[in-house]
Structures are given as structure tokens and as C-alpha cells.
Image (tube, rainbow, N blue to C red):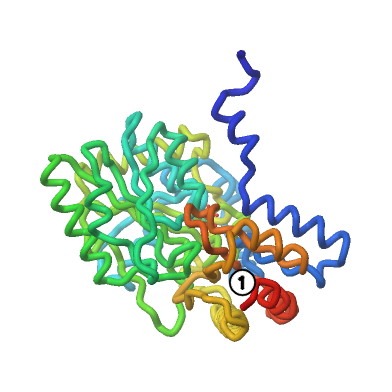
């Protein structure tokens, strides 16, 4: 039977995102019991506000720049001065020599990933992701006719396994999406891991005589703790495209602002860059939002309140492990990845009894765990611990 909307979209309307579902459940429970009695750890919506400098930068732009410039069209890749400022800030940090010619301003990380995937994929090309991963990747890959290939989680440290990658690569493999610091595990992929993955990719590129790209999705790059270093992937693998966003690092998810960094070394650089700029246009973004582009260019050294996230991290990890739960100690992001003593979906249901909302690991292609987003006020964490304690007792911990 012919339906009004496409079969794919029909399928998606019937399969709501588990994160969004929990988030909506949180809003429902808040109406019933009061927001302060609901412990909503479902969504990665930053709790700590954007640094004050963001607001003053927006005002400066509005006061000092011509209105037609601030609100006008621009090259699809974004304002050249903004792209140059982004390139220079990366050069300072990573000893690189990028320029505006390597940067495309995008509509958040999601917009950038879609541009990168549209640039690279032909129908049925394969894109590899390591479980657990941000499940929207599957939708983004499907948007451009690609096929998602999942490499299951290996060792308990959640570092990707290079040998498992080798087995997953086929002549159809076009790209690999890497996300470190990782949503949902909070793990930072080590230099050693990256080197091993790069070696396998080099070998396979030679074997199949075509490039295999790493798309490095880095919205959490700035959210690392204890001085942990997040390796800069283009230094380890030539065909790397970096996707970044200020959604988390400046608490601006609704502003939809990020960038793609395409190093000049990538194979067929000019073609790739030009295709990704066109993609920004034809996906309907046209360009990243103009006012916030100009504002973030003034805030490149600003960071969100990492110290408060760190306080939350310790409070939650210490609280849960003291109750007997088995958790991965996060090195970055604002997510805690916890093993469930029962089925993960059942655990998430049980937790709701205590007004605690967490996301089952199955939503990240990794059952047996839940993700607890601690981008909340520390009172929410403190308030949730008695409920977790009851859950632990109920589950025999
Ligand atoms: N990639 C990962 C791993 C994420 O966790 C998110 C958002 O939570 C995104 C991409 C999308 O980020 P943005 O809001 O910048 O599009």
C-alpha cells in the first residue's frame, strides 16, 4: 500500500529516539512530582550556562558590524574571517598550519557529519562505527544512502579494537566515524589505540586502492578531566575530517554552530572541500547561522564550566560505585556508563519508579549498560542517590 510519507520516514516515526522518549518522560514526571523530585539523566543538554563572554560577544557583533553583513548571505563555507580565526586557534593548539581554506562552518556537529557523509558516500558504501556509539550516526549514514557497519564493543575499557576493525572493513568501506571523548562511555581513545586503527586503515587503503576516511566527531573535545590529552587525529592519519561543535563546549546546542576541518593533506582535498561546501548548501543549511558564527569567533579560548562537571563526575561515580554498581570512570564528556545488574531496558524501567531517568545501552548498540548524563545540577545527583540505593537493594547488590 502506498503511504503518504516515505517508507523510511514512516519507520522513523514509529521508532522514537530512546533519549528523546526518556526526556519527554522526565517532563511528564516533573509536572506530576515537581522538577526538583525528578532525576533526569536522559539528555546531553548542558546545565551550566554559556560563559558570559558569549553574550557580550553577541552584543558586540550587533553593535559594531553592519546589519547586512551580520544577517546576510555569505560563502557556503562561512565567513572567511571566522574560518581563519578557527584555523589559527587550532594551529596554536596542535602545531598545524591550517587556514580558512580548511574550515567549513556548519550547523552543529550533526550538520557537519551530514555534509561529510554526503560528500563521501555513494549508495551502499559502508561506514563503520564502534559500539557503543551515538545512534543518530545510523540515521545520518542512511540519509546519504550508506550502510552502517557496527563493530561490537570489545574489551571492558571500551577502546576500539583494531583487529575487529580489520575484519569489518570491506571493499565497500568508505569511512569510519570515531567519537572521542566518547558518548556514551566517557572514554578518551588513547594515542596507542589511534595508531593501531590508523595502521589498519593504511593497510586496507593500499589493499583496496581507494581512500578510507576517518570522520572524527569531536563535540566533547574540550570536556576532558585530570589533564587527559585528546589525540589530534589528523596528526596520526592523513585522510581525517574533523567535525566539531560548540554545543557542549560552550553550552550552545540550540544555536546550531560547529565546523568541519578538512586538512589539505586529505586525498583530493580540493574536491572534498568543494563538495562539503556544496553539501552545506544543498542539504538546505545554505550556511551556518551568521550571528553565532561571528560571536563564537570571539570566544575561541572560552570554555564551559568543566570544574562543575568534574564535581558531578566524582559525586556520581563515587556514589554509585559505593552502592555496588560497576561504572566506567569517565575521562571526558558528561556521561557515565554503568553496567546494569539486569537487562538494561528493565533497569531503565525500574529506575523510573524512583523518578530516575537513564538511557538503556541498547540505544547505543550496546545492551547491558545504561548512560547517565550528568550535565545536571549537583543537587540532582545528590537527590538521586537514595533512589539508586533502593534500586541497588532491589537488584541484590
Ligand atoms: N555527536 C555526538 C557524539 C553527540 O553526542 C551529539 C549530541 O549530543 C552530536 C554529535 C550532535 O551535536 P550537535 O548538537 O552539535 O549537532
Against 296, residue 103 (above or below) is above
Q: Give the quarter of the image for residue 84.
A: bottom left
> 109 or 142, which is in the foreground?
142
The image position of residue 106, as x and y in percent, is 47, 49
Residue at (39% x, 36% y) in the render: 278
Quadrant of the frame with the C terminus: bottom right
Which residue of the protein is positioned furthest toward the front in this rendering?
396
Residue at (46% x, 43% y) in the render: 138
Residue at (17% x, 59% y) in the render: 199
From this viewpoint, is residue 380 visible? no
Residue at (51% x, 57% y) in the render: 367
Residue 207 falls left or right of residue 369: left
The image position of residue 289, as x and y in percent, is 55, 48
Disc 1 marks which residue?
374
> 351 or 47, which is in the foreground?
351
The image position of residue 344, as x and y in percent, is 58, 60
Secondary element under disc 1, as helix, strand or loop, is loop
Q: Give the quarter of the image for residue 355.
A: bottom right
Against 268, residue 310 (above or below) is below
Quadrant of the frame with the N terminus: top right
From this viewpoint, is residue 388 visible? yes
Residue 319 falls left or right of residue 241: right
Amino acid at each position: 500500500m502506498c503511504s503518504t510519507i516515505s517508507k523510511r520516514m514512516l519507520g522513523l516515526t514509529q521508532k522514537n529516539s530512546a533519549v528523546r522518549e526518556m526526556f519527554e518522560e522526565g517532563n511528564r514526571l516533573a509536572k506530576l512530582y515537581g522538577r526538583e523530585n525528578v532525576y533526569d539523566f536522559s539528555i546531553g543538554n548542558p546545565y551550566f550556562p554559556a560563559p558570559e563572554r558569549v553574550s557580550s560577544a553577541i552584543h558586540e557583533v550587533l553593535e559594531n558590524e553592519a546589519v547586512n553583513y551580520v544577517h546576510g548571505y555569505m560563502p557556503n563555507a562561512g565567513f572567511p574571517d571566522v574560518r581563519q580565526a578557527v584555523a589559527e586557534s587550532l594551529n596554536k593548539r596542535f602545531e598545524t598550519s591550517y587556514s580558512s581554506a580548511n574550515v567549513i562552518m556548519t550547523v552543529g556537529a550533526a550538520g557537519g557529519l551530514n555534509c561529510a557523509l554526503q560528500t563521501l558516500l555513494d549508495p551502499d558504501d559502508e561506514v563503520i562505527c564502534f559500539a557503543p556509539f551515538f545512534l543518530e550516526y545510523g540515521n545520518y549514514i542512511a540519509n546519504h544512502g550508506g550502510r552502517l557497519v557496527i563493530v561490537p564493543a570489545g574489551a571492558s575499557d571500551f577502546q576500539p579494537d583494531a583487529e575487529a576493525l580489520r575484519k569489518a572493513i570491506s571493499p565497500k568501506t568508505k569511512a569510519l566515524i570515531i567519537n572521542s571523548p566518547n558518548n556514551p562511555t566517557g572514554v578518551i581513545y588513547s594515542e596507542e589505540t589511534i595508531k593501531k586503527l590508523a595502521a589498519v586503515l593504511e593497510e586496507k587503503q593500499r589493499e583496496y586502492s581507494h581512500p578510507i576516511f576517518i570522520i572524527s566527531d569531536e563535540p566533547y573535545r574540550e570536556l576532558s578531566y585530570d589533564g587527559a590529552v585528546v589525540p589530534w587525529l589528523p596528526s596520526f592519519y592523513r585522510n581525517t575530517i574533523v567535525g566539531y561543535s560548540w554545543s557542549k563546549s560552550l553550552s550552545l546546542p540550540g544555536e546550531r554552530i560547529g565546523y568541519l576541518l578538512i586538512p589539505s593533506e586529505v586525498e583530493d582535498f580540493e574536491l572534498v572541500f568543494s563538495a562539503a561546501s556544496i553539501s552545506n548548501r544543498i542539504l538546505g543549511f545554505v550556511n551556518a547561522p551568521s550571528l553565532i558564527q561571528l560571536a563564537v569567533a570571539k570566544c575561541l579560548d572560552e570554555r564551559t564550566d568543566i570544574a562543575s562537571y568534574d564535581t558531578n563526575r566524582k559525586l556520581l561515580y563515587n556514589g554509585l560505585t559505593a552502592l555496588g554498581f560497576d561504572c566506567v570512570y569517565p575521562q571526558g564528556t558528561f556521561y557515565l556508563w554503568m553496567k546494569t545488574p539486569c537487562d538494561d531496558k528493565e533497569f531503565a524501567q525500574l529506575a523510573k519508579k524512583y523518578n530516575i531517568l537513564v538511557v538503556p545501552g541498547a540505544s547505543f548498540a550496546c545492551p547491558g549498560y545504561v548512560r547517565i548524563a550528568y550535565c545536571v545540577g549537583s543537587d540532582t545527583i545528590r537527590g538521586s542517590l537514595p533512589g539508586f540505593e533502593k534500586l541497588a537493594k532491589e537488584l541484590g547488590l
